[in-house]
Image: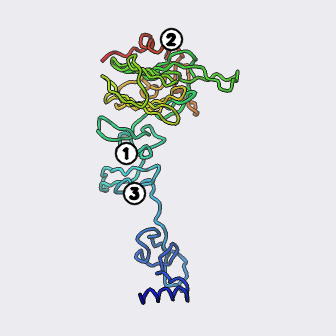
Amino acid sequence: MAYLKFLLLSVVLFGAVPAAKAVVCGQGCNTPDDCPTNGCSVCMLQLGRKRDTQYTGICVLPPAPQCGDMCESNDDCPESGCTACVGQAPTQGTAAQRICQQPTCNQQCHQDSDCNPSGECRVCAFNPLQGHLTCQPTGSVRDDPHFVGFNGKQFEFVGEPHKIFALISEPQLELLSEFAPWNPLKNRAFNGTVMSSLALSHCDDKLVMYGNRTILMNGNAILADTSAEFDSMDIATFTGPSGVTVKVSVGERWTFEFQMVGWMNIVRSVPHFDRSQEIRGVLGYGWNNSTHVESSDCLAKTKSGECTVPGKISDYTTNRSTGVAHAVWKHSIFNASSC
C-alpha cells in the first residue's frame, strides 16, 4: 500500500513514471547485440560517421528477401515473385543449398499466391496424383468472352452467336459451349458474345449448365447448394452473391470450377496430366500446339500478336447452329468416347 501511495504521489508531482529506454530504428550501435532481436535488428556500418561518437553504425531493418537469397523455408522468401524456397542440386565446388525462386509446376503450395502468377502453373489446386496442393496450369473464360489458355496467355475469342464451340476436347472428355449474342449498350457496331451454356461430357456422364442457373446431370435437375457423386464425376454447387458456383472433379484427371451469372464463366479448368497427352479445342490450343489445326488463318491473337487460336470457325464448331444442350453430344466435332 505504501508503494502505491508513493507511485501515485510521483505521478502527481513529476508526471508519468518514465519507462525504460527502448532501442529504436536509427539508434547508434557497434554490433548487432546493441540492436533489438526483432524489428531494427541489423547494425549497419555508416561510413563517414563522426569519430567523436562512441558508435560506428545505426540499427536498421533487415533487408527484404530477394530472388536468389538462401533460405530454409518459404517463410524466408518474398511474399510475391520468388516465393518458393527450392533446393538446388550441388555443382562442382558448390554444396547443395536452398534458394528463393519463382514457383515451378507441381511444386507444393497452400494458396494461389504461392504460385507464379505470370507463369503457366499459376493456380494452387489439389493434385490427386500427388495427394496434396500443387501449382498447376489452368484455363479460364470470363464474360464476353476473355480467355486465358493453359499456357497463361490471354486472348479474346468472340466466335459466332448461336453456334456450339468445342472449348476442350480429349479422347474421353469434352467441354462445349453455345455462344449467345451480347450487346448490353445496344451498340450496332458492337458484336459481342457470351457463353449461354456449357456442356461437360466424360465417359457416360453428361453435365449441362445454363447461365440462368439451370443444372442438368444426365437429364436430371441438380439443385443449388448440394453435392452428389456420379460414375465419373463429383459435383458440388454453392450460391454466392455473384451467382451459383459449380465445382466438378473428374476422377484424377480434371478439376473444374464454373460460375453461373446470367451467362457462364469458367473460373478454372485444371488438367492433372503432362503435355504428352493432347487437348484440342479453343481453350485447349496452346497446351500442345503440334496436335492442333495448322492454318494460315487466325481467329484470336495475344496483345503481342501471337496466334492463340489458328484455323477457321468451322474447325471448332459443330454442324448444328442452335438447339437444346443435350443435342450437343450427338453433334460434337470430336466425339468423346465412353470409358
Find disc 2 in the rendering and name its residue.
Answer: 323
Mark 1 residue crowding within 10 angstroms, few (<14) / some (14–19) / many (20+): many
Q: Residues within 10 Å of mark 2 (few under 14, many from 20)?
A: few
Secondary structure of residue under mark 1: loop
Q: Residue furthest right?
A: 188
Q: Residues within 10 Å of mark 3 (few under 14, many from 20)?
A: some
Q: Name the kind of residue labelled 3 in the image.
A: Asp
Q: x and y percent of residue 326 in the render?
A: 44, 14
Residue shown at the point (42%, 74%) measured from the top left = 32
Q: Amino acid at mark 1?
A: Cys
Callout 1 touching callout 2 (CB < 8 Å): no
Query: Residues at badges 2 and 3 in contact (C-beta under 8 Å)?
Result: no
What residue sits 47% from the left and 63% below the top?
Answer: 63
Query: Which residue position holds label 1?
Result: 109
In percent of width and height, residue 135 lies at: 39, 40
Q: How far apart are the two marked residues, 1 and 2, measured between alpha carbons? A: 43 Å
Number of the front mark, 2 or 3:
2
Q: Earlier in the sequence, mark 1 or mark 2?
A: 1
Quarter holding residue 220: top left
Which is more N-terminal, label 1 or label 3?
Answer: 3
Q: Amino acid at mark 2?
A: Gly
- Which residue, given by chain and number where applicable, does mark 3 sit on? 76
Q: How many angstroms separate mark 2 from mark 3 (CA)?
A: 56 Å
Q: Is residue 296 above or below residue 124?
A: above
**Do callouts 3 and 1 mark residues in contact (Cβ within 8 Å)?**
no
Judge by depth and name the residue closer to the eye, 184 or 255: 184
- Which residue sits furthest front? 1
